Image (spheres, rainbow, N blue to C red):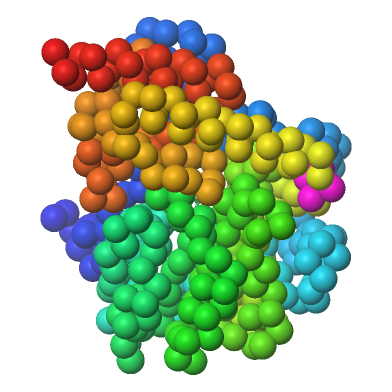
Amino acid sequence: MSTLSALARPELATQPVYEPGKPIEDVARELGLAVADITKLASNENPFGPSPLGIAAAQHALTHSELYPDGDCVALRARLAAYWQLSPRAFVVGNGSNEIIELLGHAFLRPGDEVVMGSCAFVVYKLVSLLFGAKPVEVPMRADFAHDLDAMLAAVTAHTRLVFVASPNNPTGRAHSQAELLAFARALPPHVVLCIDEAYAEYLDPAAAPDLCELIAEGRHVICLRTFSKVYGLAGLRIGYGYASEELVGLLNRVRQPFNVNAISQAAARAALDDVDFVARCRRENARGLRQLEVGLAERGVEFVASAANFILLKVGDGVRCFQWMQTQGMIVRPVASYGLPEWIRLTVGTAAQNARFLSLLDEFLAKARS
Ligand SMILES: *Cc1c(COP(=O)(O)O)cnc(C)c1O
């Protein structure tokens, strides 16, 4: 280890690095393909593009880039308050909801603390835990790939500070009911903060989507995370938010940078919340695409996990090989070996044409694998 590395906090010596889905430009350069010939279904991005209202607002905001952003996101929080029927003080806005996960670490984690999460959970929970010297306690998923909430509750000790549950969960796509989430939150002891990550909640049938606001009203130590990266199609702008008690939001505000969210993103997010038709269309198209993939996979006898989100986990035999071969064909998917699922890949639901292209490539891959 060089002297400089020895000066860094000891956690950094073993800190894993997040591996994002490969950018289209990189794959195009490596394979000598045109960018237009490449389909990326690896990062759960919106195949229907960004919210048009969001983009129009962003373009307008760009012309005032000489000004610092509103450091408290006052206008966006007012809009969120109306949307959720909560106080504006119940919202913290982040540079993506990923930043809020990190803020939870800043606010609550000390070396030696424990963080309870599922064994197939969004990897950022683990990365943030390790960064602050805390111990990720990974609870095995149920046989149906859902979180085992009873086992997660049983894994809570006197050292536990944070618990993460995503619903729908990435990468498994499984969702919990409102009753399950409320009961879990209410059963946790008060020395624990629960983060319910709802990054994909807009893809649920609105009539059946959990309403977790009563946990906030009850003063539970709970924060729910939402993002503009998925159904709103604004992943490149980096903006997400959490809703929680005023006390919890106040703590997170103390550990964030004063201008953590830029003005373009704030404007885009505010307008995107009004883009009700766009969101409804994306939800509808996603449900159709999921059905198309599920039918296609069933016809081929390929095992998959029924998903409530905009991606699907499917069993291809050797996930890394499938990923590598698909990439040579200009199709980027996500291997999930790092989640302990070496035989599976995660596929983002694309447009009907993209889904059909994936299924026909899958036929080729499976035929090659069998021969
Ligand atoms: C995509 C995703 C997010 C969103 O992250 P942003 O930083 O808002 O882009 C959060 N949680 C999970 C589980 C996700 O899959």
Whether residue 30 can be seen here: no
Percent from the top left, x then y, of residue 277?
Answer: 81, 39
- Residue at x-position 65% and y-position 76%: 244
- Where 161 sits versus 129, above or below? below
Residue 26 on the magenta span: no
Percent from the top left, x then y, of residue 231?
Answer: 65, 43
Percent from the top left, x then y, of residue 185?
Answer: 52, 80
User: Dividing the picture into quarters, in which one does residue 192 lie?
Assistant: bottom left
- Residue at x-position 59% and y-position 24%: 351
Dominant secondary structure of the residues highlighted in magenta in the image: loop
| 67 horizontally vs 294: left or right | right
Foreground of the two, 306 or 240: 306
Whether residue 75 can be seen here: yes
| 121 horizontally vs 1: left or right | right
Quadrant for the C terminus, please: top left
- Where 111 sits versus 34, above or below? below
- Residue at x-position 60% and y-position 38%: 287
| 199 horizontally vs 81: left or right | left
How many labels sit on residues? 0
- Residue at x-position 56% and y-position 30%: 289
Foreground of the two, 122 or 280: 280
Percent from the top left, x then y, of residue 76?
Answer: 80, 59
| 313 horizontally vs 320: left or right | right
Quadrant for the N terminus, please: bottom left
Residue stretch rendered in magenta on the structure: 271-275
User: Dividing the picture into quarters, in which one does residue 72 lie?
Assistant: bottom right
Foreground of the two, 276 or 110: 276
